[in-house]
Amino acid sequence: MSTSGFVQEKDKHDGWNRPQVMEPDGEAELLEVAMGPHHPSTHGVFRMDVALDGERVIRLKPVFGYLHRNHEKLGETQSYLASMPFTDRLDYICPMTNNWAYALAVEKLTGQEVPERAEYLRVIVGELTRVVNHASAIGFLIQEMGASGTPLMYAFKEREKILDLFEELTGARMMVNYMRFGGCRVDATPAWLDGVRKVLAGLPKFADEFENLLCGNEILMARCQGVGILKPELAVNAGITGPMLRATGVNYDIRKVDKYGIYDRFKFRVPLGDHGDVYDRFMIRLLEMRESFGILEQALKDIPGGPVMDPKAKLRGFRPKPGEAYGRIEAPKGELGFYLISDGSPNPYRYRIRPPSLINLTVLEDMCLGSNVADVVLIFGSVDIVLGEVDR
Amino acid sequence: MKTAEEIKAAILAAVPEAAIEVVANPSVSGQHSLRLDPSHAFAVAKFLRDDAELSLDFLSNATGVDWLDKEVSEKVKVPRTVTKTVDGVETTVEELVEETRKRTIPGCLEAVYHLYSVAKGHGPVVIRMRTGNRTDRVQLPSLTPVWRSAEFQEREIFDLFGIVFTGHPDLRRLLMWDEFKDHPMRRDYVEPDDFEYEPTAHDEVLVRAQAHRARLAAQEGSGA
């Protein structure tokens, strides 16, 4: 697509990027509802203060902080290495990509080299994580539409297989603590790589099954299509990233743009949506999953031997030179960035996480205004957030 | 992509009254930044977004940094009159004497923004703004009207660092509760001892709990 179509339309008027102000029809009183913090659709502890005119949403304010533990402050009080296991707890569905983003930021700060085999292993576990995340996100969507349990369990069946692989590799299903600055913690055995090949062989069939569930289901289409539309100009301006941005048709995948790691070696396409509605967001996730299978195949074919840690890498007594670095990757949920300032001491002076989940919620109100309250649950589900990362 | 110096020149061509300083980043990442003066930051931000060549339409990350007062000791040569006895004759001589002096660099709060261009695929361009001090002159212009993605992130900075963003459409605390008084991400933040001590306190917590109870008792005594 053309690269300039979504540049802001030169300030058509002030406040074009704000949610529109909605007035209730008629004389009826507004009903103010607090959806959450304990609502089954909120995936955790999150609240939306909604003002309703009948069934129509007039105003919606998200309320955060129920899971806030000041992760960033914690990062400042401990060494660089000690923060690595804590990154697992941010987006606990995809710990591998959190590790990767942090390792990448530190490597930018210090200029450490990553051995080739470690880069391949990072891509393999990163893409497996993407499959896990997208499968569960789709499962949760169908659950939120009312198909309780069964479709989600289909998704979790595949997820378990991949989590078993993670357990075999790192010792933990979810809190993996796998990557290090300058490589990965442990090497993969040939048997493990064979295990990945075996799981990968079953994944396309699973994706077909899931796609049938999505594309062929009339109820699902009626509920999803044309709901929660997001415009590309607003999406870019509001910093939306990941499948949600690409569903609006903006071609921006950090794997292609930054080519971090070794992503320039793989052939894959970036799926784009047309309408920016809930249906597009989930179709994008399905298509991205299929692209991930392709990347995994290529990585498993090309993976070289060699060390997985830079022999010069220093983990203990690690003191980067003063300076700062911002490193970002395309995590399954969007752009995950780490911003580090070093003052030459063993602890970072500033340790900041750019959470895709929180920033993708910026436009939640814009997407929900005017729609029915039942659709709010769906639109919120299509953003795909994890509260561990939103509140940090 | 343009270097920081070139971007500075481009900004000065468009907003001539802006004061911009290039802040070098000594680390290998090479992400140098531009420090804007708060009074012209809004105009500069608009220019960065709308300029056809830069078109930094995507604000990725906005965050705060707390810089405490920093004491530096430096050696300075000071002229001084010294009385010397040369060959039995007392003379006064002007001499340069080396002296170690301590100087305090006043602290400030800083907001840092990382900009990218989705249209052109380049970035990051880092811009930063400093407040006057850490106590009462903590206002900075909000860039939310230019980039909507700053909305929650500036609220978070306001919450955790205490920078007040003027022109922000909805400046409330984001993560802490509304009644909370302090700003937890500040470097000199001390967590209050009067909440969340363990019911079965021991060790250090016990000492804190006892001190807290004593303080409460004293308050009650003085109030009565």
Image: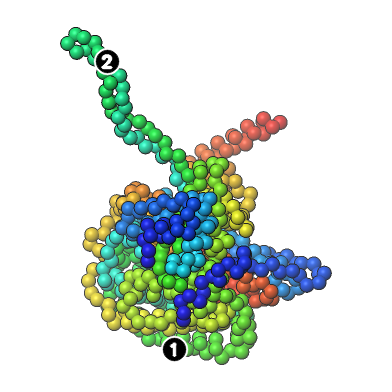
Nearest the viewer among B56 and A152 is B56
Left or right: A365, with A78 as reference point: right
Nearest the viewer among A22 and A382 is A22
- Tell me the residue that label 2 is attached to: B92
Position of A216 relative to A389 (above/below): below
Residue B174 visible in image? yes
Q: Residue furthest right?
A: A27
Disc marking residue A205: 1
Q: Residue furthest top?
A: B88
Tell me, yes or no, whether dots 1 and 2 are on the same chain.
no
Q: Residue at x 53, y 68 (%)?
A: A237
Residue A284 position within the rendered picture, expressed as x and y whole percent measured from the top left: 49, 81
Q: Residue at x 41, y 63 (%)?
A: B124
Q: Amino acid at mark 2?
A: Thr
The secondary structure type at the circle numbered 1 is helix
Residue A70 position within the rendered picture, expressed as x and y whole percent measured from the top left: 50, 54
- Residues under numbered marks 1 and 2 in contact, where contact means CB atoms less than 8 Å apart: no
Q: Residue at x 42, y 39 (%)?
A: B105
Residue A137 visible in image? no
Nearest the viewer among A97 and B74 is B74
What is the chain letter for disc 2?
B
Q: Amino acid at mark 1?
A: Lys
Nearest the viewer among A263 and B175 is A263
Residue A156 position within the rendered picture, expressed as x and y whole percent measured from the top left: 49, 78
The secondary structure type at the circle numbered 2 is strand
Give the number of marks. 2
